[in-house]
Image: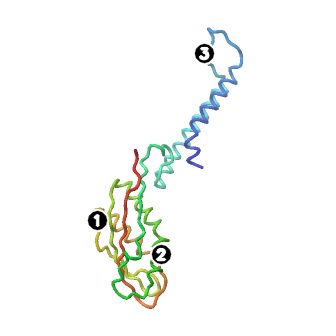
Amino acid sequence: MTKFFSKYLGKIVLMVAAVLWVGCNDKEESAEQQKPVLSSSATAKFDSIVRAKESYEGMSGLAGYLYGSTMVNDSTRKKPKGFAQTPQKSDIEIVSGGNLAVDSIMKTLKQRNPGLRHIYNKYLRKKPGFAGNLFLTLTITDDGSVAKTTIKSSTTEFKEFDEKIALAVNRWEFDKSNGKTTLTIPFVFMEIEKDP
């Protein structure tokens, strides 16, 4: 809803101003007197509409800075579109334990993949165009929590991003099992849509 208003507010202000101008200028004037003149009440209304528009745009910009995104001029912002590929069953390597079923691991990976994509898109704004593979080794306890996450290897060349992904994965919950399971999972991150 906010995006709708920010996109069309300028047009609405101009239309209201045009209606006020036409409404205040209903006398037919000669060719010599065709200067557009607004009455003082119409001018005051127009000025208040312009101030409201400027105030709204200022507040939208402020809200954007406070919450991490701008709502005004969205069409001019670069919007990177990243993709976090969900690993396949064959990509998961059980290092030790193995009491946790691969199907159960896949279920969690599919549920949590949108969160990884969100993190990737956030970091794409900081460093456009980066991509790569990130291999994480997880130790999952019998209650399903992740006891330890380590970065086995990475081709992203963006340490801050790799650490953020590892931290996010460390908070995941898997199904319960009969013991610890240590496994290595590859994550692939790539930019799929760029600005023209």
Q: Residue at x 37, y 77 (%)?
A: 92
Q: Percent position (x, y) of residue 88?
A: 41, 73
- As drawn, 152 above or below 45: below
- How far apart are labels 3 and 1 at the CA level? 67 Å
Residue furthest bottom as drawn: 178
Q: Position of residue 158 (x, y in %)?
A: 30, 62
Tell me the amino acid under the disc marked 1.
Thr
Amino acid type for the residue under numbered disc 2: Thr
Q: Residues within 10 Å of mark 1 (few under 14, many from 20)?
A: some
Which label was assigned to residue 35? 3
> Which one is in front, 61 or 161?
161
Q: Residue at x 40, y 44 (%)?
A: 196
Coloring scheme used: rainbow
Circle 2 SS class? helix
Looking at the image, residue 45 lies above or below residue 74: above
Q: Nearer the viewer, residue 90 or 14?
A: 90
In the foreground, 84 or 147: 84
In this rendering, is residue 170 above or below 40?
below
